[in-house]
């Protein structure tokens, strides 16, 4: 309202009122000039020194839990704000149970709205309870700020790209509720007391011996020693369980094609629950999937381990998965088989298996791995898997009604209502 022309006019009016000795006109011109100056001051500096921050009460949550979100607005200047409006863009399914807001024009987005006043150097916190209704890596932000002068003559808007992500992990359920045998859901398991070389961990080097394969040769050590050196692998007595997850309901990934969300979520819950089952029994458990993450298009892989945080790493990796496959399941099995330590038990979790995937599963068996196929789709069994255990889990439509179990700090699995 108060542009440069208006300010010049008010200044001229003030001068004329002094010359004409018009007291009323002088007071009016002075009041308007002061209001115009304050309006320009607020318009220019109202959002300067205003900080906006989000704080989640945990690093990640599980489907069905609630998240406590705290937002903090701070005015770090002497200029007070008679009003400031903030709109924080959040996922539509994360609509808080309190506060005001409205649906954004963007798909699946919601705007949390706050309107408040801030004194000089004041800090205001507001708390929201948000239901975690969907697995995924959910994006919060940007945030839109708007403020202005006390009179409503001028305002300033600003968009801040304060992007934060929050991961909602899949639920972990008892394997019996998946339709799998509670005592031995993955079929054949190698004896835990076996001692074998872990080809994924190099302990050192030794002189080359006749019979050592090319893959065993330690080329950097050979260059340093100027003679052929072979790798010495770590020995391990702890058995490994590798969970291979196929995210494609139709088996063969095809960009942009329809997928079955219930089958996908049930497959992810199955993979998470089998990983928890293995860790509870003392196995080193790892994960690999042909899916991808939003910010990382590389292979999604969690190396085998049995630390107290291993299940958390696996659940977060599963929580971030998108419903798109980077490569076929058969290709993933073939490529990842070279990374497996000898004697690793492999569980293939998939809606179904193509002929190529069946051949890849046979290849795992031929390399000395115990292999179990867990089918999570809507179709029938697969044939041609002699010597490989095949389990059928499901039905996939009931994954939301399964009983959740939780992990204690020590990594053991205990029952919990869900």
Image (cartoon, helix red, strand yellow):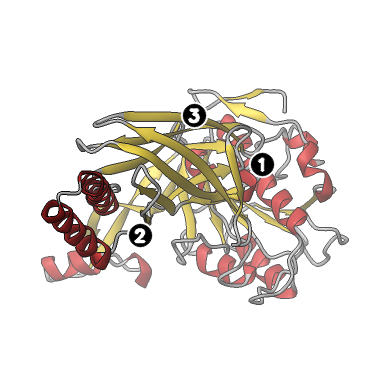
**Residue annotated with mark 2:** 1
**Residue annotated with mark 3:** 127
The residue under the point 71% across, 74% down is 257
Measuring from the top left, give residue 271's x and y in whole percent. Answer: 64, 47
- Which quadrant: the C terminus? top right
User: Can you tell which of label 2 and label 1 is closer to the viewer?
Assistant: 2
| Horizontal side, residue 70 vs residue 76: left or right | right
Say which label, 2 or 3, has the lower sequence index.
2
Q: Nearer the viewer, residue 316 or 302?
A: 316
Q: Residues within 10 Å of mark 2 (few under 14, many from 20)?
A: few
The residue under the point 63% across, 68% down is 329
Q: Which mark is residue 206?
A: none
Measuring from the top left, give residue 247's x and y in whole percent. Answer: 65, 61
User: Can you tell which of label 2 and label 3 is closer to the viewer?
Assistant: 2
Say which label, 2 or 1, has the lower sequence index.
2
Q: Which mark is residue 133?
A: 1
Q: Nearer the viewer, residue 231 or 33?
A: 33
The residue under the point 74% across, 71% down is 354
* Up-down relation of residue 254 to residue 232 (above or below): below
Give the Cα distance between marks 2 and 1. Answer: 46 Å
Q: Quadrant of residue 156?
A: bottom left
Measuring from the top left, give residue 97's x and y in whole percent. Answer: 63, 33
Q: Residues within 10 Å of mark 3 (few under 14, many from 20)?
A: some
| Horizontal side, residue 378 vs residue 67: left or right | right
- Total marks shown come to 3
* Up-down relation of residue 178 to residue 208 (above or below): above
């Amino acid at each position: 309202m108060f542009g440069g022309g208006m300010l010049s006019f008010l200044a001229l009016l003030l001068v004329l009122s002094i010359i004409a000795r018009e007291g009323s006109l002088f007071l009016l011109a002075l009041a308007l000039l002061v209001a115009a100056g304050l309006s320009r001051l607020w318009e220019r500096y109202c959002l300067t020194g205003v900080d906006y921050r989000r704080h989640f009460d945990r690093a990640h949550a599980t489907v069905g839990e609630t998240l406590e979100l705290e937002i903090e607005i701070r005015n770090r200047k002497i200029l007070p704000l008679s009003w400031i409006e903030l709109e924080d863009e959040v996922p539509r399914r994360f609509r808080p149970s309190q506060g005001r807001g409205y649906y954004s024009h963007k798909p699946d987005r919601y705007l949390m709205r706050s309107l408040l006043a801030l004194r000089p150097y004041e800090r205001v916190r507001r708390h929201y309870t948000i239901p975690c209704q969907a697995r995924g890596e959910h994006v919060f932000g940007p945030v839109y700020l708007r403020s202005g002068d006390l009179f409503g003559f001028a305002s300033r808007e600003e968009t801040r790209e304060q992007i934060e992500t929050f991961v909602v992990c899949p639920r972990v359920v008892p394997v019996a509720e998946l339709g799998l045998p509670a005592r031995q859901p993955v079929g054949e398991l190698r004896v835990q007391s076996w001692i074998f070389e872990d080809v994924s961990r190099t302990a050192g080097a030794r002189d080359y011996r006749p019979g050592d394969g090319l893959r065993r040769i330690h080329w950097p050590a050979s260059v340093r020693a100027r003679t052929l050196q072979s790798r010495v692998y770590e020995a391990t007595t702890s058995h490994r369980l590798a969970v291979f997850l196929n995210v494609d309901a139709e088996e063969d990934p095809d960009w942009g094609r329809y997928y079955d969300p219930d089958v996908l979520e049930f497959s992810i819950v199955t993979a998470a629950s089998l990983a928890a089952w293995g860790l509870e029994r003392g196995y080193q458990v790892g994960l690999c999937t042909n899916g991808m993450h939003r910010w990382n298009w590389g292979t999604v892989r969690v190396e085998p381990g049995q630390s107290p945080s291993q299940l958390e790493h696996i659940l977060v990796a599963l929580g971030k998965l998108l419903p798109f496959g980077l490569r076929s399941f058969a290709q993933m099995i073939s490529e990842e088989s070279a990374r497996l330590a000898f004697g690793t038990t492999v569980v293939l979790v998939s809606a179904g298996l193509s002929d190529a995937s069946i051949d890849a599963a046979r290849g795992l068996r031929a390399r000395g791995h115990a292999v179990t196929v867990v089918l999570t789709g809507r179709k029938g069994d697969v044939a041609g898997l002699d010597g490989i255990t095949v389990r059928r889990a499901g039905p996939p439509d009931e994954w939301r009604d399964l009983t959740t179990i939780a992990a204690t700090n020590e990594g053991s699995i205990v029952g919990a209502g869900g």
